[in-house]
Image (spheres, rainbow, N blue to C red):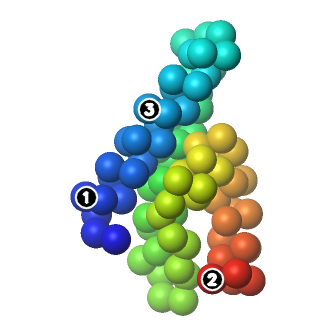
Amino acid sequence: MDILQTILVGIAAIIVLAIVLKLLKFSIKTILKFAINAVIGIALIFLLRLIPGVDIPITWWTGLVSGLFGIPGVIVLLILSFFLF
C-alpha cells in the first residue's frame, strides 16, 4: 500500500469508530481519546513497517485494534505479525 492509501484507511477507521461511539452515547472526550489512540496506532504501524522484516498490513482490522487499544494493540499486532504474516 502506498502512503496515501494508508492515510485514507486510517482516517476512515477513525470516522467509523467515532460514529459507532456516538451512536452508543459515548461522550466527546471518550471519542477524542479513541481518535488520538487511532492516530498514534496507525502512525506506529506505519513506522514499524519501515523496519525490515516487520510486515504488519494496514487493514480495517489492524486500524480497529490500534484505534481501540493504542500502543498495546500495536504491540500485540507486532507479535502476531511474526506468527501469522
Figure quadrant of the N terminus: bottom left
| Marks 3 and 2, how far apart at CA | 27 Å
- Marks 3/2 in contact by CB < 8 Å: the verdict is no
Crowdedness near tag 1: few (<14), some (14–19) or many (≥20) residues, C-alpha within 10 Å: few
Counting from the top left corner in percent of width and height, residue 59 is at 50, 60
Residue situated in front as seen by the camera: 60 or 71: 60
- Residue 71 seen in the current view: no
Q: Amino acid at mark 2?
A: Phe
What residue does disc 3 label?
Answer: 15
- Say which residue appears at 60% left-offset and 15% top-offset: 23
Disc sitting over residue 85 in the figure: 2
Give the mark nearer the N terminus: 3 vs 2. Answer: 3
Q: Quadrant of residue 12?
A: top left
Disc sitting over residue 4 in the figure: 1
- Say which residue appears at 58% left-offset and 58% top-offset: 62
Q: Is 47 located above or below residue 85 in the figure?
A: above
Q: Amino acid at mark 3?
A: Ile
- Say which residue appears at 25% left-offset and 58% top-offset: 4
